[in-house]
Amino acid sequence: MLKLLAIDRFTLLLVLMVVLASIVPISGQAADIFAVITTIAIAILFFLHGAKLSREAVVQGMMDWKLHGLVFSFTFILFPILGLLAKPILLPLLGQQLYWGFLFLCFLPSTVQSSIAFTSIANGNVASAVCSASFSNIIGMFITPILVSFFILGQSEHGFDPTASIIKITLLLLVPFILGQILRPYVYPKMQKKPSIVKAFDQGSILMVVYGAFSGAVVAGLWHQIEGQTLLILILACSVLLTMVMLLALYIPKWLGFKRADQVAIFFCGSKKTLASGVPMAQILFIGQPLGMIVLPIMIFHQIQLMVCGMIANRWSKQSTTE
């Protein structure tokens, strides 16, 4: 049943972190120490991401600027426009914090690992997917804070300095990523020998941030603020958003005359949003805000996109083998 629903162990662990934070939330001095440990884990995570990325694949994929331009348009233009257009409908239904979370997910870059994995399964252009998804994450470290500053925190009562946030994101995410790229010849061979350690950091750091975020939200009364009906509306909003973008990502590349392999890469890179980069960025950008409610939409969207993309990738894989 779990395979049928495309629910993996990581998703179950995410749910477990929410449950654990609801029952035994961390607070006070322990929460401060936990936050420092989480920050170190995130820096190591992005160092490993930098070491994993193949320079050859990047060079090969960088040549296809039309494909990357279209993916960029989906990720940082189409998604934000849809999120902003939904404000008159969703703001009264979800409330300010959940709508901020919904809009924040629209501002995030694409995923890296799952975009590449689904593109590979569906026999798409993997090299371009590697380059496009990676470029999306790197440029997103600068674009996402600017969009958050202008459309979310810039409209709030609290002052927000996007420059300071970009500097923090650069130091925490981009600098470790670049170091990983520089030290790739020495680090990557060791990573290949111990993939379980890499996966543990990859998933463990995100689980730590989710637990810390929801602990703070639970202490602040999260579950007294969100009703079951509101949660269902949020799930429906994420589903509608994903459906609209996927339909456009399916037909626009065909209309523009891209080859099938490129269409697959555009579809999976342009329709997805990252949880791995989104949660750490939220921790930096929304200091003093109800972080649990802000990351809840991306957690829901993340699972929906994995389920839908998993089914589509498997179907396209079978179609390509029969052609």
Image (cartoon, rainbow, N blue to C red):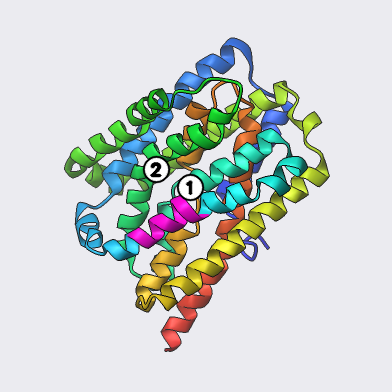
Asked if labels 1 and 2 touch by Cβ distance under 8 angstroms, the answer is: yes
Tag 2 secondary structure:
helix
Residue 269: x percent and y percent? 43, 59
Identity, as a three-letter code, of the amino acid under mark 1: Thr
Q: Is residue 13 visible?
A: no
Identity, as a three-letter code, of the amino acid under mark 2: Gly
Q: Say which residue label 1 marks.
A: 274
Front-lying residue, 277 or 39: 277
Is residue 72 within the magenta segment? yes
Q: Residue at x 43, y 41 (%)?
A: 202
Q: Earlier in the sequence, mark 2 or mark 1?
A: 2
Distance from the alpha carbon under mark 2 to that under mark 1: 10 Å
Is residue 277 within the magenta segment? no
Quarter of the rendering occupied by the N terminus: bottom right
Q: Say which residue label 2 marks.
A: 140
Residue 191: x percent and y percent? 29, 44
